[in-house]
Image: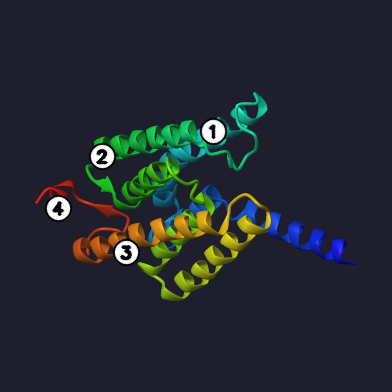
């Protein structure tokens, strides 16, 4: 009887953990933000570069490395294997930031802070394998907090639930989940502070003009 209960908990935990992985959570945010702030054509123009330059290449990279045996699983839960994943994601984000600045003349504020969060997690990975699932979902909650408090609190609850599933699935220890959450809270606080300070009425909340970053 106890085994069936444990098995059910693991199945539910896997479903929650797999669905609310960093990529899916970010896609949900970007789609929601685009729908709220742009018409269909503008939303496509805004989201497609993010999809083609960052999200799809990362998915292809992970799938390819899992199939070739370089990564143990799609979560890339091995601490050593994560080093190359962090580097690849950083290259994709930097490529997008450069493309967006050349094309549109501004720095994508959200993607910039995703890069900062990634660097923080990469540094943490030298000492402890912080939970990326937990960290990115906490940051997504902060992104929602910037313009919708209710959804922000809902997503913060989701982030906590994801953290619990990572422990149940034995992908992370309690310490690793708290470390990921702690890093994300710090980065999120800085993001929200900067977003409130530099937000302009004529700019979407995702962008910041280059000149304001160098004053």
Report x, y in % for residue 130.
48, 50
> For residue 139, what is the image quadrant?
bottom left
Q: Earlier in the sequence, mark 3 or mark 2?
A: 2
Per the model, the C-alpha gap separating discs 1 and 2 is: 31 Å
Pointers 1 and 2 in contact (C-beta within 8 Å): no
Image height check: is 116 above or below 58? below
Q: Earlier in the sequence, mark 4 or mark 2?
A: 2
* Left or right side of 178 for 195: left
Query: For mark 1, what is the residue?
Result: 81
Q: Secondary structure at mark 3?
A: helix
Q: Residue furthest right?
A: 1
Residue at image point 26% right, 46% down: 107
Pointers 4 and 3 in contact (C-beta within 8 Å): no
Residue at image point 46% right, 60% down: 181
Q: Nearer the viewer, residue 108 or 136?
A: 136
Report x, y in % for residue 148.
41, 71
Per the model, the C-alpha gap separating discs 4 and 2 is: 14 Å
Q: Residue furthest top?
A: 68
Q: Earlier in the sequence, mark 4 or mark 1?
A: 1
Q: Earlier in the sequence, mark 4 or mark 3?
A: 3
Residue neighbourhood size for the residue with mark 3, other residues' Cα within 10 Å, grouped as few (<14), some (14–19), many (≥20): few
Query: For mark 4, what is the residue?
Result: 212
Q: Nearer the viewer, residue 16 or 122?
A: 122
Per the model, the C-alpha gap separating discs 3 and 2 is: 25 Å
Q: Which mark is residue 189?
A: 3
Per the model, the C-alpha gap separating discs 4 and 1 is: 37 Å
Residue neighbourhood size for the residue with mark 4, other residues' Cα within 10 Å, grouped as few (<14), some (14–19), many (≥20): few
Query: For mark 2, what is the residue?
Result: 101
Q: Secondary structure at mark 4?
A: helix
Q: Earlier in the sequence, mark 3 or mark 1?
A: 1
Per the model, the C-alpha gap separating discs 4 and 3 is: 19 Å
């Amino acid at each position: 009887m106890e085994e069936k209960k444990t098995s059910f908990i693991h199945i539910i935990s896997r479903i929650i953990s797999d669905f609310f992985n960093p990529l899916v959570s970010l896609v949900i945010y970007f789609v929601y933000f685009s729908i709220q702030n742009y018409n269909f054509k503008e939303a496509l123009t805004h989201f497609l570069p993010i999809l083609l330059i960052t999200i799809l290449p990362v998915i292809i990279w992970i799938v390819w490395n899992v199939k070739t045996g370089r990564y143990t699983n799609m979560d890339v839960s091995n601490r050593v294997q994560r080093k190359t994943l962090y580097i690849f994601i950083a290259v994709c984000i930097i490529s997008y930031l450069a493309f967006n600045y050349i094309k549109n003349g501004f720095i994508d504020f959200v993607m910039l802070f995703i890069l900062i969060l990634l660097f923080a997690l990469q540094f943490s990975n030298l000492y402890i394998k912080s939970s990326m699932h937990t960290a990115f979902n906490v940051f997504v909650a902060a992104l929602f907090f910037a313009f919708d408090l209710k959804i922000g609190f809902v997503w913060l609850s989701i982030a906590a639930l994801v953290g619990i599933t990572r422990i149940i699935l034995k992908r992370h220890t309690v310490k690793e989940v708290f470390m990921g959450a702690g890093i994300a809270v710090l980065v999120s606080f800085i993001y929200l502070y900067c977003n409130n300070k530099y937000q302009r009425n004529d700019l979407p909340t995702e962008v910041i003009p280059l000149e304001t970053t160098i004053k």
